[in-house]
Amino acid sequence: MIVLVTGASGFLGRAVAAELVAAGHEVRTLQRRPSGVDGVTDFLGSINDPEHVSRAVAGAEGVVHLAAKVSLAGDPGAFHTVNVEGTRTALDAAEAAGVSRFVQVSSPSVAHAGTALAGVGAEPASPENARGDYARTKAEAELLALARDSDAMRVIAIRPHIVWGPGDTQLIGRVVDRARSGRLPLLNGGTALIDTTYVDNAASGIAAALHRADTAHGKAYVLTNGEPRPVGDMLAAICLAAGVRPPRWSIPAALGRTAGSAIEKVWAVRPGADEPPMTRFLAEQLSTAHWFDQRDIREALDWVPAVSIDEGLRRLAAHYSEIDALG
Amino acid sequence: MVTAPAATPPLDLPGLDPRFSHIIAVPGSGADAGLTHDWHYLDTGAELARLGVPVIGTILAVHGNPTWSYYWRDLLNQSLAAAEAGAPAWRIIAVDQLDMGFSERTGIHRPLAQRVSDLSAFTDTLDLTGPVISLGHDWGGVLSLGWAVDHPAQLTGVMLLNTAVHHEAGKPIPAPLRLARARGMLASSTVRTPAFLETTLALTTDPLDAAVKDAYRAPYRTADRRGGIGGFVADIPADASHESFPELERIAAGVAALDLPTLMLWGPRDPIFSDYYLDDLIERLPHANVHRFEGAGHMLAEDAPYAASVLTWLGDNSASLSDPGSSALSPREAFAAAAGSVVSDSEEAGIHAADSAATDTDASASASASESNDSVADDASFVPLWHNLDARRDHTATAVIDMSTRGSRGPQQVSWKQLADRVSQLAAGLTSIGVRKGQRVSLLIPPGPTLTAVVYACFRIGAVVVVADAGLGVKGLTRAVRGSWPDFVIGEAPGLAAARTLGWPGVRISAARLPKISAVALGVSYSLRDLITLGADTPLPAPPRGDDDAAILFTSGSTGPAKGVVYRHRQLSAVRDVLARHFEVTADTGLVTGFAPFALLGPALGTRSVTPEMDVSSPRTLTARAVAAAVEASGASMVFLSPAAILNVVATAGDLTADDRSELARVHTFLSTGAPISGDMLTSVGELMPNATPHSPYGMTECLLVTDITLEGIRAAAGDANTGVCVGKPIGDNLVRISALDSDGAATGTPSTEPGVLGEIIISAPHLKDHYDRLWLTDRAAVHGTEIATDAAAADAAENTDATDAGDATNVAAGSPARWHRTGDVGHLDELGRLWVEGRLPHVIVSATGPIAPVGTEQDIEGVTAVRRAAVVGVGPHGVRQAVAVVETIPTAKRPGLASPELTAAVRESTSLPLVAVLVVPQLPTDIRHNSKIDRSRLSEWAERLLAGGKPTAP
């Protein structure tokens, strides 16, 4: 089928586009910069420009909507414009073009009020309770998308949780950079159990959602590797794969949250090129459990992750040793 | 007093369906003659009629003071829901008594007799027909029993929650009531202020929901509406001069004649209706099904799942409750006969008697049943526990040696004659002070010759010994002693001091003679020495029969509150016999044991027993040299030790001299008992006793010997692909079955011997316990679904011809259905019929891919060099739980937390089970008794908190 992937220049977007090409689909992409994915047709443009979107979606059967502003801090208005209005534009254009399958790529943070989550399913998105601008706007976007689910256009929301892998600058890059400069503490000993998703699994799961949208539509699914790990274990494993010393110091979680909150405020009035070393959101993410029941999604999508955490780490280590060899 | 009409409750009370509310005008009787009063009551009758289902019978529920019919809302709701779901329908009628709840405020004085008559007038007016089962709580219990006694034609059963029908003259009534009744206090605590009401509502174990509390308060908002509460408290007949005393006595006497199915559900944490009153009711209604909900209190309906229990009981007894003539035996007859029906091994006992006679001296107890002058004619297969003691009553050879470190007298030696004489003297002494068959005697004496003599004396006169060891801790011990409500307590000073301080029941008897002042301080009535004097001219009563209760042993409490396990004499004798047969114990064997249950069996086995030098309350104090000295002193060839003792014996092996080693070389049988032990540890101890066959039997308080495996067997199993601890094959006539776990982790499978199936281990043995004490629901669960096992055994036997199953065939074909027990352990049987234990049922991790038993993985992990001991527990919600390893490391970790990346990797590599986390702790939490049973439930809750991001505290 003809599929439009928005936001294909991002880490996950590239992987999804490549996965769909490999599955034999005719893949188009829409984003500001070239996607860099072999075998796709790039449509350069803005997700907020109805004309750009309509052009890209014309004739497509499926849409995978990934375009979003992803950040731990930034201008609240920008989050709304890209995440909420961008989704609305994409939905409008898709409906108008007669698209029959629409995959909204969302985030588990849309239903995360900051408390520990252990083995839960995909709770309804809640903009009122979401923590931070990113989560709030993504929650609004998901509600918007699922409200458009119809017989004509089947909408399904997939919430991959903490996607990582070789080439990721968002998470892995930051973790490694911070560990390298000694700015990566553990909170409460790093024991909070978290789910993560190796990038290939996120891509194959999203592709499965596109394929299964005819039956598994109208609701949101959290997607993970199904192998939760203590955050300290995961950070250490990533550091070891990257050849960096793992974090060795721990601070109480409450202190981390308070500090994060304070630092966030300072950064807000003093925007710089770098990111705040700690935000309240990050402190919560690093100190409370969030892992999920994967039975529903695996059954609904008839899908299982192909790459284990351990295999993912081996690939990450191989990737870093290549970089080291080149460097 | 003020009058006010009846009303219906507010419509929004939590859990109360307004459809159940009715008001009825009832013509009065007695003081009310000529008057008519309006009653408010709850009734599911109309809803059942609407459903069109036939009603089996009516439950007449009577609330206590100061509650109202709201107390029974769960039963109303659940019974209707069950009927809607197609279950047999029971109609529930819950009244508000006059002056209480939403019934009329009559302004008329209502003593007990009036209230009993009121209730009759109510049911007359309602024109209640068909079978009725009474149900009452608190003083409502008394009233419901009053109604019960007065309506024999309609009554088919009785149910009671925390109540009382009798108060011993001269015994003060419970303190909280004394206070409430005190002059000047009565009106202010019960009527003018809501103090009595509020106190009652605060008695729940967990605080009541605010809305529920408000619902209880709803009919009692003002002093005018609380007159009935004060009236009730004033009507408690504290002594014989009270106007309601004769009516209470009439009801109490009537109750003792009731011969109907009876259920008593009890919350032991009740400051008023304590176990004292439960014990009294059990004496009146010995056939009752009794369940004490440990941790629950006076407001049982709020603390425990009483409604489900009531419906279960009604279902179990529906035939006799709906048609009392339907069963051949009345409940009292059936209760008396139940003892008799336990006789199941008479033929086998005969066979084994013949076997042992051929191989053995007179030590093999079962051989000489017919020769015993104690045996009762129609009880021929039963050889009493004291048989060998009697047979040797003229022998001057040593029977018991105590080398333990208590006291400074050095080793104590007691001959057979001395022991037999002492047992007879104590038996006579106990009889002389009024200890009777069936009465309970709690023993707080450490193991040693005194304990041995007292135990056999109790056995001889049919007194039931209650044995709860210090391993339960003070809290557990108090719970155990109060729960079993002994009539007598025999102890040493520390135990008696605890009994006094903690208010344990029972007449206190001191093991040692105490100075008068101490005796008074401890509330001690007699010493054992006094008993001997007092009993000098007292003839011994007839001995108990095989089916009389003999002992209540408490479980270790490592898996929930300790449970009292009741053994009858026949079953204890069977323990002796299985031990004698399986391990070939003869008069010449001699036992060295620091493990109390087996130390006590020496005299029963007719062989010398010796307790080595150690602190018997702490097995870890036993050294290798002390074992050698005990062997030397006794010439014993059999040694029993617990794993904790073995650990230290092995650790101190370096101190053994050449002479010590040659003594140990005489041992031919070595048993590790009480908890599982590793093959390595058994090997180490085996090396100290080179001529001994080391055994590690598997058993539990409920069945001390289930299977057995030798060191050789353990080695043979070591390379096996099976997971878990191999505990060998069933001993003697024992049967082992597996009830497979379903995907939800419940043991729902039909009990079978199919190999490789993970499930709950189900056992049958002649020496299996009889029942749990005052735990009807636990008892029921322990045998639930096991009746199929007997059929399955017959089917197996028909299909198979191998030795094990041929044994089954005999057992089943003999027409004596086996008694089964669900052990709560999980594991599987292998192709060779060996049992592999893989953990406890509550510790099974129900993951998204199905149930996981922990032990196999724990063994894998314990193969990692840096790991001393491992536990595998689950975190997350039931059904999607994830497995976590918690390990003790070498060297010991300083604080709990995540394992290092290296250890984490090594642990993950050691096993095929996916582990989401590897945590280290300085020490895993274990039980006190064995120091080896890991408290995985507690550990799981701890891991849950930690892995949710909580602060790393110790588990």
Image: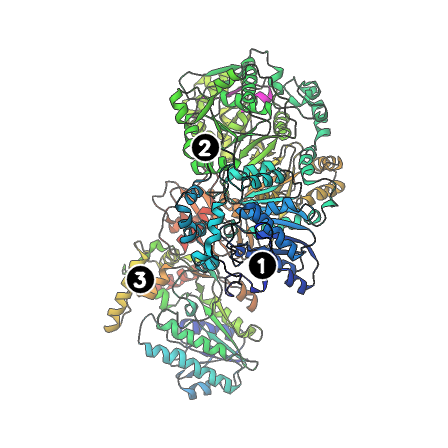
Whether residue B709 sits left or right of residue B935 in the image: it is right
Of callouts 2 and 1, the N-terminal one = 1
Count of marks, rendered view: 3
> Does the magenta portion include A258?
no
In the image, residue A79 above or below residue B155: below
Q: Which mark is residue B174?
A: none
Q: Which of the image's four quarters has the C terminus of chain A?
A: bottom left
Q: Which residues are magenta?
A: B600-616
| Mark 1 lies on residue | B42
Q: Amino acid at mark 3?
A: Arg
| Mark 2 lies on residue | B470
Single out the mark in the foreground, 3 or 1: 1
Same chain under badges 3 and 2? The reply is: no
Gap between marks 3 and 1 measured at Cα: 54 Å
Gap between marks 3 and 2 measured at Cα: 47 Å
Gap between marks 2 and 1 measured at Cα: 48 Å
Residue B723 vs residue B189, the one in the foreground: B189
Give me the residue at 55% from left, 35% from top: B701
> Does the magenta portion include B607?
yes
How far from the left and from the top, in percent, is residue B102? 52, 59
Whether residue B345 sits left or right of residue A151 in the image: it is right
**The quadrant where residue B797 appears:** top right
| Mark 3 lies on residue | A257
